[in-house]
Image (tube, rainbow, N blue to C red):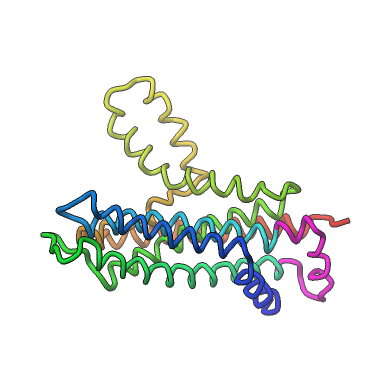
């Protein structure tokens, strides 16, 4: 497994598409700095909010492109056959790839997170807003939550890659999974509050309840209110969100290994 992890790490960091995603991430953080001009009273809060959204988007793209290049393309080009010649279980190949992607996501989150924090501190110039953004543990715990979010999406993309014969399917379905998982919590809350009395929308409540059993609520890993407004999330809710994410990761990686073990390569 160690050899698969190291080779994936080297290949992932050399990837040109990942370099493009990194540039995009920097641009999104630059947009966070510019967005501060639209809120003269809370420039740092607005910059942090926009920047965290850009950070999540960048991490999701990193995850999907890495899975696409390190697993999907190797299966498509049949170069995976060279890795399978090692006298080790097939599952070690996928698990090694997955752990490598998680490590690279952690590095990307740390680099972009530090860059974002520098941008936030300089947003608004010398103006001191009434409610200061919270540094330290509050901020980095929020970044950790975004990394866990991306880790779930990575596990889903890995599962799709182990099944798919279409190279771009993990990328396309991964983006849909990330978007649906993020919006699920807000939709469920809106329906629980009565959907403003709209009966047509309320008819969707049973469908959303059913989806809840299969799709993780990734919004439970978004704790940005803590560094933005100093509102610390409930520790039980945080632990619950983390456990649900871990359960989905274990389930999806297990399904990926089972599918990969049964797959025949010609």
Query: Left of 45 or right of it: where is 141?
Result: right
Query: Left of 255 or right of it: where is 144?
Result: left
Q: Is 11 rendered above or below residue 156?
A: below
Q: Nearer the viewer, residue 221 or 62?
A: 62
- Residue 251, visible in the rendered structure: no
Q: Position of residue 148 (x, y in %)?
A: 46, 62
Q: Is 82 rendered above or below residue 211?
A: below
| Magenta residues (range) | 72-91
Q: Position of residue 42 (x, y in %)?
A: 18, 55
Query: Left of 6 or right of it: where is 165?
Result: right
Residue lying farthest to the top in this orientation: 199
Res. 264 image quadrant: bottom right
Q: Position of residue 85 (x, y in %)?
A: 84, 72
Q: Which residue does the image show at 52% across and 44% down from the upper left?
A: 214
Res. 194 image quadrant: top left
- Residue 144, visible in the rendered structure: yes
Q: Nearer the viewer, residue 240 or 56?
A: 56
Q: Which residue does the image show at 75% across and 61% down from the upper left?
A: 74
Q: Quadrant of the N terminus?
A: bottom right
Q: Which residue does the image show at 31% across and 70% down from the upper left?
A: 118
Q: Which residue does the image show at 49% across and 73% down from the upper left?
A: 107
Q: Position of residue 16 (x, y in %)?
A: 62, 64
Q: Is residue 85 magenta?
A: yes
Q: Quadrant of the C terminus?
A: bottom right
Please tell me whether the stretch drawn in magenta is mainly helix, strand or loop.
helix
Q: Is residue 103 magenta?
A: no
Q: Nearer the viewer, residue 152 or 134?
A: 134
Residue lying farthest to the right in this orientation: 266
Res. 89 image quadrant: bottom right
Q: How many marks?
A: 0
């Amino acid at each position: 497994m160690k050899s698969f992890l190291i080779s994936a790490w080297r290949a992932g960091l050399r990837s040109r598409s990942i370099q493009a995603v990194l540039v995009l991430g920097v641009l999104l953080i630059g947009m966070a700095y510019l967005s501060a001009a639209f809120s003269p009273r809370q420039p740092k809060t607005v910059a942090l909010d926009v920047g965290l959204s850009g950070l999540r988007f960048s991490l999701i793209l990193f995850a999907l492109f890495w899975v696409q290049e390190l697993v999907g393309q190797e299966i498509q080009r049949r170069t995976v056959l060279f890795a399978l010649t090692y006298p080790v279980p097939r599952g070690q190949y996928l698990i090694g790839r997955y752990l490598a992607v998680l490590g690279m996501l952690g590095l990307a989150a740390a680099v972009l997170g530090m860059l974002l924090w520098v941008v936030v501190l300089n947003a608004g110039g010398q103006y001191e807003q009434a409610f200061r953004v919270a540094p330290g543990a509050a901020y980095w715990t929020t970044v950790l939550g975004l990394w866990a979010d991306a880790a779930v999406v990575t596990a889903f993309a890995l599962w799709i890659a182990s099944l798919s014969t279409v190279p771009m399917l993990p990328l396309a379905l991964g983006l849909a999974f990330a978007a649906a998982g993020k919006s699920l919590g807000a939709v469920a809350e809106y329906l629980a509050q009565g959907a403003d009395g709209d009966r047509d929308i309320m008819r969707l409540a049973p469908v959303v309840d059913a989806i809840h059993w299969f799709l993780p609520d990734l919004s439970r890993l978004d704790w940005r209110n803590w560094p933005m407004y100093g509102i610390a999330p409930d520790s039980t809710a945080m632990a619950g969100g983390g456990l649900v994410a871990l359960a989905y990761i274990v389930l999806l990686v297990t399904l990926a290994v089972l599918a990969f073990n049964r797959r025949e390569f010609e």
